[in-house]
Amino acid sequence: MVRKSLIIVIGLLVVLSLSSLACAQDVWAWNQFTKPYELFKYQITQYTSSWDYEVGEDVLKETRQLQTVELRQVDDETTEVTIANTYDVPTNRLSDELSVMGMGLGWAMGAAEWVGEFMILGLFGTELELEVGSSMQTFDGSRIRVVEKQTVAGVEGYFCTKSRREDDGSGNRVDILTTELVIAPDVGWPLLVRVYKDDQVRYIMELVEYASR
């Protein structure tokens, strides 16, 4: 009788331990900024296709910029936000570019390839369990997988892939990679984003500096 009771107690302890682990599972604090101060500095690389008359075909053109977002809590109800962009502009287009920036559209236009993924992140971000090997399916049929841990700009996060399954024309189902992400549980924005199109990287948003206190 004593032995049977001991087995039951041990079994309950195991179940409770597993339950505690499940409850303690990390999830992403997506788009949440609760720290008194945070600094995000990203390098954004975008590849756009344009016709090259010299080679007679479309080629990918690379453009880069640095984006800095600084968040500082003023009090319990107010947070000061500072956004800065650094990038190269042809001198003969400077007036046009500054006019666009004056309307506050510079960052939004540069992030065109990222907007769709940004919206999807908002839907799945708080549901995905951040544990190597876990996965989930999104509303559009894509599957997100947590592959491994990676460190970006000194912050440890989880490297995730997002892919959609398609028919290759021969009746075979293949996974098409659309996005790669690195996310950290307590950092509200991704540490790294790569957006793919036709098996080529079209947009990269990589954290190069991060600070919080």
Image (cartoon, rainbow, N blue to C red):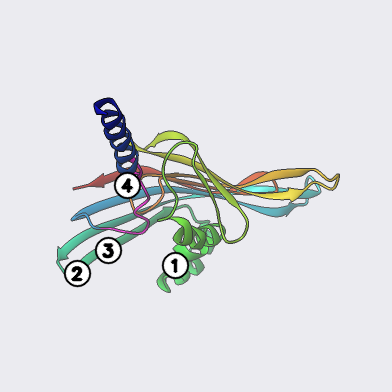
Callout 3 secondary element = strand
Q: Which one is in front, 108 or 8?
A: 8
Q: Which residues are magenta?
A: 21-33
Residue at which label 1 appears: 98
Label 2 vs label 3, nearer the camera: 2
What numbered label is drawn on residue 81? 3
On the image, the x and y values in percent for residue 55 come to 79, 45
Q: Residue 149 magenta-drawn?
A: no
Q: Are the residues at dot 3 and dot 4 in contact (C-beta closer than 8 Å)? A: no
Q: Earlier in the sequence, mark 4 or mark 1?
A: 4
On the image, the x and y values in percent for residue 195 come to 57, 50
Q: Are the residues at dot 4 and dot 1 in contact (C-beta closer than 8 Å)? A: no
On the image, the x and y values in percent for residue 126 come to 40, 56
Residue at which label 2 appears: 78
Q: Hey, what amino acid is under mark 1?
A: Leu
Callout 2 secondary element = strand
Residue at which label 4 appears: 23
Q: Hey, what amino acid is under mark 2?
A: Thr
> Mark 4 and mark 1: span between their CA atoms?
50 Å
Label 4 vs label 1, nearer the camera: 4
Q: Hey, what amino acid is under mark 4?
A: Cys
Q: Which one is in front, 26 or 59?
A: 26
Q: Earlier in the sequence, mark 2 or mark 4?
A: 4
Q: Which one is in front, 171 or 103?
A: 171
Q: Hey, what amino acid is under mark 3?
A: Val
The number of numbered badges drawn on the structure is 4
